[in-house]
Image: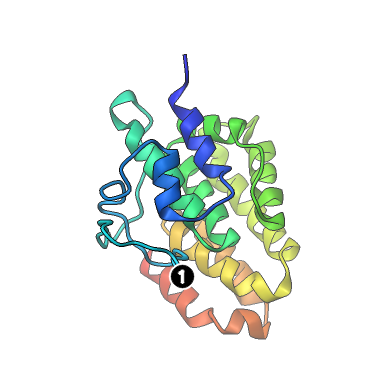
Amino acid sequence: MTHWLDKVITLLQARTSNLRELAELAGEDPRTFYRGISLNEVDIEGQDLSGMEFERYEHELAPVANDNNVSTWIKLAASISAAGRQEERVALVIRSVLYDRAGGMEMLARFKDDRAKFAFYAINEIRRSLSESSEDEDQAIIASLIPKFFSYTYPLNRGRLLYFLAKHLASYPIVNQAIRFCLNKTTSMFVDAHRSEINELLDAAK
């Protein structure tokens, strides 16, 4: 019997960010699949979205892993896959695990790769680091990974990394502190381009 997460993993590993194709991979109608999904930060350049329904939603879709909410997980996977930046995909994967550890860890156990080098590295580090921890330790472990991710990613992308981490994870206090630590220790011009937005996101979560 096929597990519902198999469809989630299919979406996360899809070699496309086309929203119409992702909905079809999920076996859903592209016209209605993304109702309630914000297109903020999603790479939609060149995509044909005619006839598809979207709606701004102030909070990102949060997964709830039970039989009545499988479609929520599937929509989340499609949203992650459609994120144009690998840095945002990593932030959304982390948020999935912190919000719902059981479902998020099962997803990570099945998820083998990402289409980009940094995301592939980061997701493997998250999986390895959380595999033997308890839920109470997760925030601290993720916080300890933030400086490592910051150092690993290409300098040109470090500002974007901190921005997406702040956008999706600022509400987790320990992770918030780790993002701010990385922000405050650097004078990189590539980070400065996003500094005010990052600070606003971090401050607003207090």
Q: Quadrant of residue 86?
A: bottom right
Q: 56 or 132, which lies in front?
A: 56
Q: Mark 1 sits on what residue?
A: 45
Give the left or right position of residue 5, taking residue 27 as reference: right
For residue 27, which quarter of the picture? top left
Residue 42 position, x and y percent, is 44, 63
Q: Residue at x 49, y 58 (%)?
A: 83
**Closest to the observer: 69 or 19?**
19
Quarter residue 112 falls in: top right
Query: What's the residue at 38%, 67% (across, down)?
Result: 40
11 over 131 or under it: above or below: below
Q: Residue at x 61, y 31 (%)?
A: 109
Q: Position of residue 72 (x, y in %)?
A: 34, 39
Report the side of 179 relative to 3 (left or right): right
| 32 over 185 or under it: above or below | above
Q: Secondary structure at mark 1?
A: loop
Q: Is residue 63 visible?
A: no
Amino acid type at circle 1 is Glu
